[in-house]
Amino acid sequence: MEGIVKKYQQKFKKIKEEMNRWDELQSRLISQFKNASSIIERLQILQDAKHYGNLNSIGGIEAAVLRKQMESLQTILLSMQKTLEEFRGIVLSLEKFHRDGKQLVRGGSNQLTVKQLQQRVGLKPTLADCLDGLMILWDMHNSEYVLKISLVSTLSTLAVKPWYMEITFDLGALQQLLVDQPNIPKEEVQYISEIIFAEEIC
């Protein structure tokens, strides 16, 4: 039992690192989303010649400005895809942590009984609590990752249709959804962290 506990402790330290990495990626994605949204909103204005004033005397100015903005937008959208790939890496790691965790207690010659999995010493969590926590963490982050893919995909669609009248509202709503991370209740993550990220497990 003690050997399994030590292995769990090592895994939980790595999971904490992944959680910190997730927060960093979330901040990056929000920044990228805001930058892309700003360009998309500007495209509506840039397609109207009256906004160029005296610059209209420069031949092809409107097309040149639009082209530059679209190039910047495409660069940001590509960066967002790379960020999503990093999110995916974390989701896959969490899934592996949970899978390995189950293997630790259910595989091999030292398979633990249900009673051992639910054994509690004082206020320390049981191994079953730890396994459930790992599964919930993976499920929440996987759901949020799927939502992020959908939001970035929607943004990319709006990028080629900047003439939508409701685009400002759409972008604001999409951005708020991204900021909120609705599939990751902070209080639940905090509770799970208190259980499985303890210095001494089980």
Image: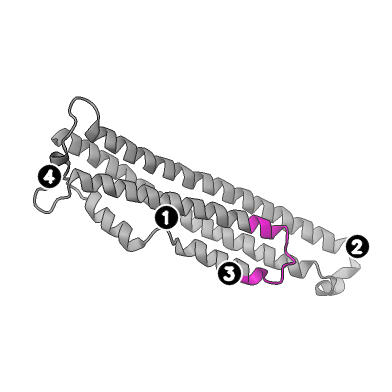
Count residues near mark 3 (Cα–Cα under 10 Å), then give few for <14, some for 14-19, many for 20+: few
Q: Look at label 2 and name its amino acid.
A: Gly
Nearest to N terminus: mark 1 or mark 4:
1
Residue ID at (50%, 51%): 146
Count residues near mark 1 (Cα–Cα under 10 Å), then give few for <14, some for 14-19, many for 20+: few
* Label ID, residue 59: 2
Nearest to N terminus: mark 4 or mark 3:
4
Q: How is the image coloured?
A: one colour
Q: Secondary structure at mark 1?
A: helix
Q: Look at label 4 and name its amino acid.
A: Gln
Nearest to N terminus: mark 2 or mark 3:
2
Asked whether the residues under the numbered discs 4 and 3 touch, taking CB atoms below 8 Å apart as contact, a structural biologist would say no
Residue ID at (61%, 66%): 171
Q: Look at label 1 and name its amino acid.
A: Asp
User: Over which residues does the magenta segment extend?
Assistant: 155-169
Mark 4 to mark 3: distance in Å? 49 Å
Q: Position of residue 81 (x, y in %)?
A: 58, 48
Nearer to us: label 2 or label 3: 3
Q: Which residue is mark 1?
A: 23
Q: Which residue is mark 4?
A: 119
Count residues near mark 4 (Cα–Cα under 10 Å), then give few for <14, some for 14-19, many for 20+: some
